[in-house]
Image (tube, rainbow, N blue to C red):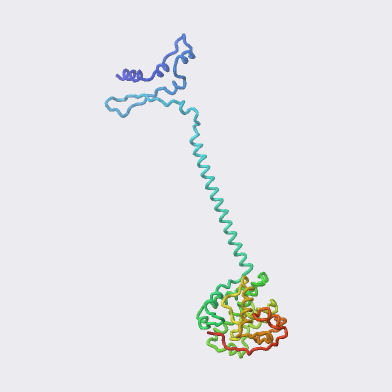
Amino acid sequence: MKVSRLVLIIGLLSPAFHFACKPVSGNETAEQTESNSFMDSETIESSEIVLVQDTDSYDEPMINKPIAVPDKRHVKNVEPTSIETITDDTALNDNEAVESELVNSDIEGNTNEIEENNNVLEAEILKTPNHAIWNALLNKYVKAGKVDYASFKKDTDLEKYLDLLANNPPESSWSRDEQLAYWINAYNAFTIKLIVDNYPVKSIMDLHNGKPWDVKWINLGSKSYSLNQIENDIIRPQFKEPRIHFAVNCAAKSCPPIANEAFTAANLEQLLEKQTIAFINDTNYNTISSGKVNLSKIFEWYASDFGSLIDFISKYSEKSVSSKASISYMEYDWALNGR
């Protein structure tokens, strides 16, 4: 029973099986037998029979079924490792992309770090304070040259700004404009501090026996200064800029009105010019005509800073002034410039 079924199954196979199993007779060579076959050795090889046991059938035990091995011609030109190679190449490309991304990320990160370090280094070298706090305070509490000392007294930002100045005194590496802006702001801020610490007060002349400018109480860096030292030992001799007299403020009504913005290196020239023009042409401080000028006491006290006084006035006055005009000076009002 088993043999006959096996023969029957084999008989149903393709002719390739018969040629593969046909014995070579004495009159035929192996080449002739091969030529009579319509399939080459590769086909015969690919059609060899493998017997496997059918374990799924339980009605008849141990039935063997033939399974054909796939024709090798379909894969004979494919390298066995080609799939692995493609996979490896893909992985390599992915790895290269990831590596490139990491390198670019590292470069970008290093660049940002270098820029940050450069900014820190530059700030460390210059140590120039930012006058934004002072600028905001002036904007809030100064109107038309009048100062709201009561509000200044309540605002803790004044102390913050003074600490900023104290911790960042001028360095030789600063530009001329950065240094001059610093000293003007320092003079004005510490003058307001002096009034605020003694507020309410009617006049700055009521403090320190009428000589508040001579007291050394302003600590900047490792040194202590008086207001007089800042103006007469630093600003005037070092910068030789006559327009500073319309920038520094002594808290008096007759003093040139304090600007409602901070001086900076960027706005120094423009603001000095603006303050000078405004003060000279304000009739509360100076009256000017062609043949006569009645000027602020400031022009008398600091006459040496202005050179030819008539020439200086003529440069900024809206009215023409004769070179032979007479000069006189107004009384100075030391009452507080508060509001």
Number of numbered discs on residues: 0
Res 309 quadrant in image: bottom right
Determine whether, in the image, residue 153 is placed left or right of residue 315.
left
Q: Nearer the viewer, residue 246 or 61?
A: 246
Residue located farthest toward the top when viewing the structure as drawn: 27
Q: Position of residue 97 (x, y in %)?
A: 53, 46
Indicate whether 122 appears above or below 270: above
Asked whether residue 234 is in view, the answer is no
Task: Tell me the residue at 61%/62% (across/down).
Answer: 118
Indicate whether 8 appears above or below 93: above
Task: Tell me the residue at 69%/83% (across/down).
Answer: 321
Q: Nearer the viewer, residue 101 or 319?
A: 319
Q: Position of residue 311 (x, y in %)?
A: 71, 80
Determine whether, in the image, residue 31 is placed left or right of residue 167.
left
Indicate whether 123 appears above or below 66: below
Q: Position of residue 84 (x, y in %)?
A: 49, 36
Residue located farthest toward the left when viewing the structure as drawn: 59
Res 268 quadrant in image: bottom right
Indicate whether 31 appears above or below 157: above
**The N terminus lies in quadrant:** top left
Res 67 quadrant in image: top left
Asked whether residue 4 is in view, the answer is yes
Q: Position of residue 303 (x, y in %)?
A: 70, 84
